[in-house]
Amino acid sequence: EAQVTQNPRYLITVTGKKLTVTCSQNMNHEYMSWYRQDPGLGLRQIYYSMNVEVTDKGDVPEGYKVSRKEKRNFPLILESPSPNQTSLYFCASSFRQGGHEQYFGPGTRLTVT
Amino acid sequence: GENVEQHPSTLSVQEGDSAVIKCTYSDSASNYFPWYKQELGKRPQLIIDIRSNVGEKKDQRIAVTLNKTAKHFSLHITETQPEDSAVYFCAAVGDDKIIFGKGTRLHILP
């Protein structure tokens, strides 16, 4: 089944404790992206990757890192999480760069205390 | 920075009536305009999209119109049904970045 998976789905952590949210797709998509969703703010792009070893900042990259060592994986890293990073995070992938349907993962609800 | 404005933020319509959601964008390089539907507790899913060389596209009860000169595009849902209740997001896409609107919560009233 074609899908985007994220882990974990729920995470409660403390300020400053490094964490990684994994994202994987099995559709051989070139383009992958991370978003955060906050009430009243919609979906905001954090980072995106147009292919392996190519990553770029979206609108809200501060406090996040990403890597794209393999085509299927695009982990999101929070080196030192802070409470303002409490949010719902979605990973998404598409066949090619932005002008194609985005397939979203199930979301990761992160709480930083 | 680039921006997409979406209106209204909340919309209530009687079942069977039509709903219209409007978006404007600022980046003239945008060339792809998708609409996503997000049901409560679920992930966003594409419902319809339009490219810059097309003025209108229809898929059953859903249609999208694009006015490139005005940098404006709209989602039209006719004969609304209870399952249309959700949050709808528009987006404007250039070569790489994707900018979403803030969303419209659509309520279908019985």
Image (cartoon, coloured by chain):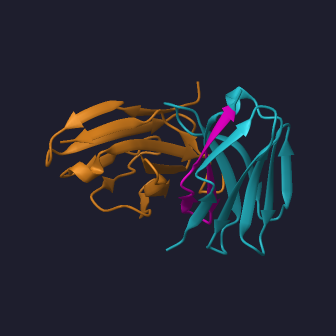
Chain shown in orange? A
The location of residue B65, given as percent across then percent down, is: 81, 57
Q: Residue at x 49, y 30 (%)?
A: B41
Total tally of numbered discs in the picture: 0
Name the main secondary structure of what is drawn in magenta: strand
Q: Residue at x 65, y 33 (%)?
A: B85
Relative to A36, does residue B16 appear above or below in the rendering?
above
Q: Is residue B87 visible?
A: yes
Q: Is residue B16 left or right of residue B44?
A: right
Relative to A91, does residue B25 appear above or below in the rendering?
below
Q: Quadrant of the C terminus of chain B?
A: top right
Of residues A89 and A92, the one drawn nearer to the viewer in this rendering: A89
Q: Residue at x 42, y 60 (%)?
A: A55
Chain shown in cyan? B
The location of residue B61, given as percent across then percent down, is: 83, 38
The magenta-colored residue range is B88-108
The location of residue A42, given as percent across then percent down, is: 49, 51
Residue A60 picture quarter: bottom left
Relative to B15, does residue A86 appear above or below in the rendering?
below
Residue B41 in magenta?
A: no
Q: Residue at x 73, y 66 (%)?
A: B72
Q: Is residue A8 visible?
A: no
Q: Is residue A54 left or right of residue B35?
A: left
Residue B94 in magenta?
A: yes
Residue B83 picture quarter: top right
